[in-house]
Amino acid sequence: MIEHETTNIVVTDLDKYYDALDKALLRYHGMKINDINKIIRELWTLTYKGEDITNIEIQSGQDSGARANRSYNYRIVMSKGSTQMDMRGRCSAGQRVLASIVIRLALAETFCLNCGVVALDEPTTNLDFENKRGLAIALGQIIASRAAQSNFQLVVITHDEDFVSMMKQELSSQTGFNMPERYYQVSREEGHDGRFYSKINAVDWDDL
């Protein structure tokens, strides 16, 4: 009898703890989605120079079912004024590229403060001049604001020399941090043995 009652009490307590943890996770999930969307809103306003999309955000829908099998469906929604619609299938290649970069930066800002390495590979693909410039401004401000973080490093891989010049101009206009002295240029050269080798040169910003 005592063992039965004790078991019932334990089961009841575990169910209470499970409910409390479940509610805490849902609350944490909602808070992080709000944090991410706040950063997305700021970066999108700063970078996107078109007039057809006011803002983008991540929205999540919860699948119905048992708590243990709960999952979320995420989608990117764009808005113009008070009208919202799914971004998928309704935007240009350049808008998709910019949206993916903005979302990656927002996720890094939200979750990766203790792992401050962000890598962007050809971030200006399909971007027009104005949106490239907006991206350079956003990256410059992020670099300046995170300069005091000892483990922060932004790696940008690009063939776009115009974008490199924009980054130089934007970084030089920022205050409160030391301007990087150089960037690295990777080239491909043929060796004496007829094989091709990659060559990395450190180039001073002043030579750009």
Image: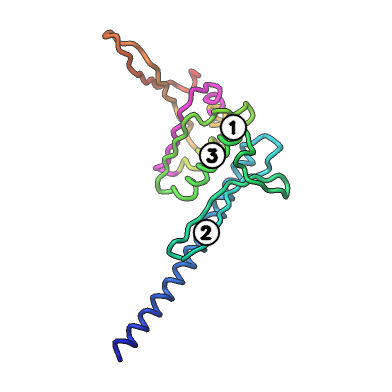
> Quick check: 34 above or below 144?
below
Number of residues whose C-alpha sits closer than 10 Å to that of mark 1, classed few (under 14), some (14–19) or many (20 or more): few
Amino acid at the residue labelled 3: Ser
Magenta range is 149-167
**Is residue 189 rendered to the left or right of residue 21?**
left
Q: Earlier in the sequence, mark 2 or mark 3?
A: 2
Question: Residue placed at 61% from the left, 45% from the top?
Answer: 42
Amino acid at the residue labelled 2: Asp
Q: Nearer the viewer, mark 1 or mark 3?
A: 1
Amino acid at the residue labelled 1: Ala
Residue contact between numbered discs 1 and 3, judged by CB atoms under 8 Å: no
Q: Is residue 160 magenta?
A: yes
Q: Which residue is mark 3?
A: 100
| Label 1 to label 3: alpha-carbon separation | 11 Å
Number of residues whose C-alpha sits closer than 10 Å to that of mark 3, classed few (under 14), some (14–19) or many (20 or more): some
The residue most toward the left is 193
Q: Which residue is mark 1?
A: 93
